[in-house]
Image (cartoon, rainbow, N blue to C red):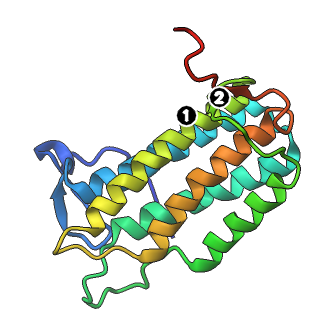
């Protein structure tokens, strides 16, 4: 259970922050950058939800679940799997969460026409906001993969899959929010030459 009764602690005034394991790292550490960018992506999804105004309701429900998953992802990244015994069971992203994203992508995609061009971020405000969330999620994914590539770091493989699938979800969701693709703005190569 999380208890937040005092927001400032002054412990980060030296440029460090505590992981869920208690270990302190510099705030620019790749692990901290990874879960910090996951938090940023979550905030972008929250902004997209505001722009969507709860419509369509099925997408609203999916995005709400995803925001909770994003905290799970941040918690997963915040507690490195070092093999050391902790006084609690660390929260980890599961393959079931990845599978749920895939199912939701497929459910939305069945209403969309196949693309014959790239989509420019835009159309409706909600769709554009989902594209912003998608690009922040891609940045989080790149950081998570870079962290996993470090020789002394362990990252849950399901966390990497989740971040990858989430950016796919947000792309399809942006089209779905754009009147099921009807308001998509398509790229026209060389149009302004």
Picture layout, residue 112 above or below residue 95: above
Q: Residue at x 79, y 46 (%)?
A: 114
Q: Which x, y percent locates residue 72?
A: 52, 66
Mark 1 element type? helix
Q: What crowding class fits label 1: few (fewer than 14 Cα within 10 Å), some (14-19), or many (20 or more)?
A: many
Q: Which mark is residue 132?
A: 1
Q: Residue at x 33, y 54 (%)?
A: 143
Write the residue at 55% across / 34% down. 132
Corner quadrant of residue 77: bottom left
Q: Residue furthest top?
A: 193
Can residue 43 be seen from the camera position used here?
no
- Secondary structure beneath dot 2 equals helix
- Residue 118 image point, x, y percent: 63, 35
**Relative to the observer, which residue lies in front, 56 or 124?**
124
Residue 193 locus on image (x, y percent): 52, 8
Tell me the tag on residue 62. Answer: none
Question: Is residue 94 in view from this perspective?
Answer: yes
Residue wearing tag 2: 128
Between the residue at mark 2 and the residue at mark 1, the CA separation in whole angstroms equals: 6 Å
Asked whether the beta carbons under mark 2 and mark 1 sit within 8 Å of each other, the answer is yes
Would you identify the image quadrant in which residue 96 lies?
Answer: bottom right
Which residue ends up furthest to the left in the rendered image?
14
Q: Residue at x 56, y 78 (%)?
A: 94
Q: How many marks?
A: 2
| Residue 154 image offset from top left, x and y in percent | 28, 76
Sort mark 2 into few (<14), some (14-19) or many (20+) by Cα contacts within 10 Å.
Answer: many
């Amino acid at each position: 259970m999380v208890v937040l009764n005092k927001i400032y602690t002054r412990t980060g005034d030296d440029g460090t922050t505590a992981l869920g394991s208690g270990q302190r790292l510099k705030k620019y550490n790749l692990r901290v950058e990874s879960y910090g960018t996951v938090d940023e992506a979550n905030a972008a999804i929250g902004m997209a939800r505001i722009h969507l105004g709860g419509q369509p309701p099925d997408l609203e429900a999916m995005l709400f679940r995803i925001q909770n998953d994003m905290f799970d992802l941040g918690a997963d990244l915040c507690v490195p799997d070092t093999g050391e015994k902790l006084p609690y069971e660390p929260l980890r992203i599961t393959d079931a969460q990845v599978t749920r994203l895939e199912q939701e992508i497929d459910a939305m995609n069945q209403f969309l026409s196949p693309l014959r061009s790239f989509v420019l971020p835009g159309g409706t405000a909600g769709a554009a906001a989902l594209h912003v969330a998608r690009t922040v999620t891609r940045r989080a994914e790149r950081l998570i993969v870079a962290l996993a590539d470090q020789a002394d770091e362990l990252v849950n493989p399901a966390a990497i899959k989740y971040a990858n699938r989430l950016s796919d979800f947000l792309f399809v969701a942006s089209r779905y929010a754009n009147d099921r693709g009807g308001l998509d703005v398509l790229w026209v190569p060389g149009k302004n030459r």
